[in-house]
Image (cartoon, rainbow, N blue to C red):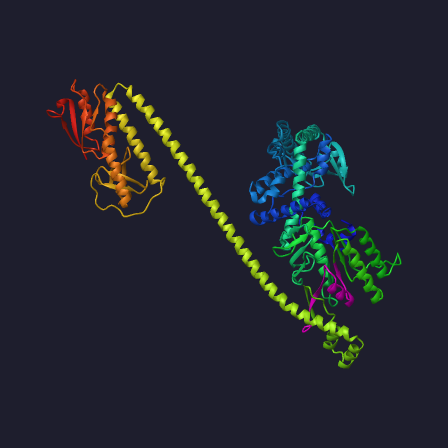
């Protein structure tokens, strides 16, 4: 982009304002070098980066730029093998910290994708960062613990200094009569005392300095020479050790030089991007659409260099099929500002700067923008205003192409009006023939007529309020403007006869044309007002539609997240259940080989109680969703109820105890639950039929007896307990356990279990014909 055109459109003033928001010198330099991009990809990327930065500033606050300085010189020196200073190393550490924090600041959210692509290149170097911070306290101070050697040197230095101070204070007291002041001082890193010149022979030592008046000599007593020498030696060692530490840290930076340099460049690039973003927030900038058809629509555009309290928003657009807009109207009506606004906003957007327009705006993807604005009269070149403009126009005709936007201010002015108008029309025709887009301001009526009868050319005017005699600074596309010279002169007090005389000098057809313009302008204002109302309604509807779509999208995400969490929770529950089952089976196998029957039974009961306790704990912790319904008022054994914490039907095995707890059967599991968690079952007719069919099916599949002959007591108890659960679920009322007669040990073990079994109502030995003493007949609850 030609620098002359950037200057004409005041792009350099925009970059100066953005510089104020950059935090580092390299960032300010990048702002100063800012140029409009040509490639669509580069423009879109730059705008997306600035928009991401603006959204981040609003969402998360200030970016982590604290302590960022220019370290390019220090890095260059280190890259060549040099050793830099403590302050430069500290600044490098600040850059590394800023880069690391920036990676966290941008995060991994998809909404900041443009910035995430940049921070992806950041390599956190926490160890190098810590090494520098641990060794360097401030820009002028190295930490005592930067190295063991430095710690030892400084410890010795403090001890020696303490000894010198004690010694010299003693000498001050002894020689106070000979001293100018009862204190000591330092000259050349050596402790001395101020001795009066006339008493210099009374204090034996080395003279290091004298006062300006010559009345005082600063003498190092001989008794301090060795101590001062020791201190000086330690100070030299300290300096050498500090230099070694700085060299070691510089070599660590050199080891990761590529990553450090890359992180540094990214931070400076971020400084540029966030400076543009902060400026965008200041001017309430938005991201426009980039159109390849070279049309543009700048809604409620504001010139960014005009103060907020003065600037008037104006909608400026070039529709498809239009290549030239001729803007007319009175002086000081805002014609030139309109041209500059169009050109400057295009330059800003193509440089990745958000522009002060309303949402839904667009810019054309112009490869170059040319401007002939302002008086370029040059005394040195002896050029008139007309000559200067024409020289510039010739240059524009030579350089512009079909992807250019050309801005002419007062095209053809500065010469004879007839010739100037003819030249203006010829220039417009020539540029239009090349497909170049044009915005031109003029006072010539001939150009208004030219725009009315020429294809792809439209009139426009800056609105003027004839009541207040003030311009509104709004652009009206499609309507030519009037100069309103007669009306303004009359309102300002010019006599009517003079105004009428002036009208008589104008051709009647020209007056009719002006009246037609006035009528068109009035109709245009009314239509424009209606269009603005319709546009506002449309914008509001689009905003509400976008908001609704966002809410629907949020709901979909919440639903998907809830399903995912439910699946994950279900998977975890299954895994826990499987692990618990495996553990119980393992314990049961161990119990099978256990010799002590009572101990085995006790351990089995402990396992069962532990499982029940875990289920109860899950219920009380809200591990299952509760359901609502009518609570059970009267309980009876065998009653089917709904367990709200599991949302599952269960069978009541025992009546509630004093604590309000009872035992229920859930599948093959027996649970102790609270009566308050049980609800009445409300079944449909289809469910009742399904339940009866299931019960009948269970009656056919569960045997009426269980044979445990030949098994040991533990194995038999396990099998009988399982059988009783299945029989109870199948709805059997009486079953037979075949255990045989033998020694009677197996029968006694089973009867001990029956005494406390929740399914057993009563039990007895079999009678004649039932198996006698070899069987036990059980009546189930």
Instruction: Say whether residue 452 is visible.
Output: yes
The magenta region covers: 439-468
Question: Residue 731 vs residue 491: left or right?
Answer: left
Q: Position of residue 689 (x, y in %)?
A: 26, 41
Residue that protrudes farthest toward the left in the picture? 768
Q: Is residue 736 left or right of residue 1?
A: left
Residue 677 part of the magenta-drawn span: no
**Number of callouts:** 0
Q: Position of residue 277 (x, y in %)?
A: 64, 49
**Residue 458: quadrant of the picture:** bottom right
Q: Residue furthest bottom?
A: 497
The residue lying toward the viewer, choosing from 147 and 767, is: 767
Which residue is pictured at 82% across the width and 61% down the height? 423
- Percent across and percent down for residue 534 are 58, 63
Residue 461 shown in magenta: yes
Instruction: Classify residue 259 by image quadrant.
Output: top right
The quarter of the rendered structure image containing the C terminus is top left
Residue 228 visible in the shown view: no
Q: Which is nearer the eye, 133 or 392?
A: 392
Q: Residue at x 64, y 52 (%)?
A: 288
Q: Nearer the viewer, residue 163 or 183?
A: 163
Residue 144 coordinates in the image, percent (x, y): 62, 32
Work out whether 612 lies above or below 465: above
**Residue ID at (50%, 48%):** 553
Instruction: Report the front residue among 609 and 707.
Output: 707
Is residue 127 placed above or below 520 in the rendered structure?
above
Q: Is residue 451 above or below residue 696?
A: below
């Amino acid at each position: 982009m030609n620098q002359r055109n950037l200057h004409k459109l005041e792009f350099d003033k925009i970059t100066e304002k953005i510089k104020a928001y950059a935090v580092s010198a390299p960032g300010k330099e990048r702002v100063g070098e800012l140029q409009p991009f040509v490639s669509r990809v580069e423009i879109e990327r730059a705008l997306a980066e600035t928009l991401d930065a603006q959204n981040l500033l609003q969402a998360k606050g200030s970016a982590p730029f604290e302590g960022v300085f220019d370290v390019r010189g220090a890095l260059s020196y280190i890259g060549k093998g040099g050793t830099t200073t403590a302050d430069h190393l500290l600044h490098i550490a600040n850059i590394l910290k800023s880069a690391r924090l920036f990676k966290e600041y941008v995060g991994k959210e998809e909404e900041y994708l443009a910035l995430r692509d940049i921070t992806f290149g950041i390599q956190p170097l926490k160890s190098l960062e810590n090494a520098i911070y641990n060794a360097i306290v401030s820009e002028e101070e190295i930490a005592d613990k930067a190295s063991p050697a430095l710690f030892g040197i400084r410890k010795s230095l403090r001890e020696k200094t303490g000894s010198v101070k004690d010694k010299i204070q003693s000498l001050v007291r002894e020689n106070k009569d000979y001293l100018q002041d009862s204190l000591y001082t330092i000259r050349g890193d050596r402790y001395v005392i101020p001795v009066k010149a006339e008493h210099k022979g009374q204090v034996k030592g080395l003279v290091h300095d004298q006062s300006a008046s010559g009345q005082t000599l600063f003498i190092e007593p001989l008794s301090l020479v060795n101590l001062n020498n020791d201190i000086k030696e330690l100070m030299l060692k300290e300096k050498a050790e500090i230099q070694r530490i700085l060299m070691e840290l510089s070599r660590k930076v050199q080891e990761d030089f590529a990553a450090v340099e890359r992180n540094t460049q990214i931070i400076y690039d971020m400084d540029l991007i966030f400076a543009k973003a902060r400026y965008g927030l200041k001017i309430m900038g938005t991201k426009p659409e980039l159109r390849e058809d070279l049309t543009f629509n700048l809604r409620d555009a504001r010139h960014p260099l005009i103060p907020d309290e003065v600037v008037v928003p104006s909608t400026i657009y070039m529709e498809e099929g239009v290549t030239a807009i001729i803007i007319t109207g009175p002086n000081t009506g805002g014609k030139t500002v309109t041209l500059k606004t169009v050109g400057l906003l295009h330059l800003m957007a193509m440089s990745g700067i958000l522009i002060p327009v309303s949402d839904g705006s667009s810019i054309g993807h112009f490869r170059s923008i040319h401007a002939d604005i302002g008086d370029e009269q040059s005394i040195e070149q002896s050029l008139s205003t007309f000559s200067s403009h024409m020289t510039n126009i010739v240059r524009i005709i030579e350089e512009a192409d079909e992807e250019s936007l050309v801005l002419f201010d007062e095209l053809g002015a500065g010469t004879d009006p007839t010739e100037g108008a003819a030249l203006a029309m010829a220039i417009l025709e020539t540029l239009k023939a090349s497909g170049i887009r044009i915005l031109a301001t003029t006072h010539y009526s001939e150009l208004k007529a030219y725009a009315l009868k020429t294809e792809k050319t439209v009139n426009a005017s800056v609105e003027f309020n004839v009541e207040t005699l003030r311009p509104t600074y709004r652009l009206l596309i499609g309507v030519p403007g009037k100069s309103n010279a007669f009306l303004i002169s009359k309102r300002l007090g010019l006599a009517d006869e003079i105004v009428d005389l002036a009208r008589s000098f104008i051709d009647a057809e020209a007056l009719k044309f002006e009246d037609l313009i006035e009528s068109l302008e009035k109709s245009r204002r009314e239509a424009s007002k209606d269009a603005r109302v319709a546009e506002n309604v449309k914008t509001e509807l689009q905003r509400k539609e976008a908001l609704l779509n966002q809410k629907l999208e949020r709901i979909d995400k919440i639903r998907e997240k809830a399903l995912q969490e439910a699946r994950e929770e279900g998977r975890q529950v299954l895994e826990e259940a499987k692990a618990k089952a495996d553990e119980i089976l393992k314990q049961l196998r161990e119990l099978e080989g256990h010799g002590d029957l009572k101990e085995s039974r006790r351990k089995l009961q402990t396992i069962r109680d532990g499982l029940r306790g875990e289920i109860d704990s899950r219920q009380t912790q809200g591990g299952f969703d509760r359901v609502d319904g009518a609570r059970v008022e009267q309980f009876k054994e065998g009653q089917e109820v709904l367990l709200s914490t599991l949302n599952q039907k269960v069978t009541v095995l025992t009546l509630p105890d004093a604590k309000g707890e009872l035992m229920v059967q859930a599948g093959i599991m027996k649970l102790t639950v609270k009566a308050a968690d049980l609800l009445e079952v409300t079944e449909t007719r289809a469910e009742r039929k399904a339940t009866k069919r299931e019960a009948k099916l269970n009656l056919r599949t569960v045997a009426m007896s269980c044979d445990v002959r030949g098994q040991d007591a533990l194995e038999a108890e396990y099998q009988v307990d399982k059988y009783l659960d299945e029989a109870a679920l199948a709805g059997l009322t009486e079953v037979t356990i075949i255990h045989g007669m033998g020694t009677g040990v197996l029968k006694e073990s089973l009867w001990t279990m029956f005494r406390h079994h929740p399914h057993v109502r009563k039990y007895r030995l079999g009678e004649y014909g039932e198996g006698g003493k070899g069987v036990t007949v059980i009546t189930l609850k």
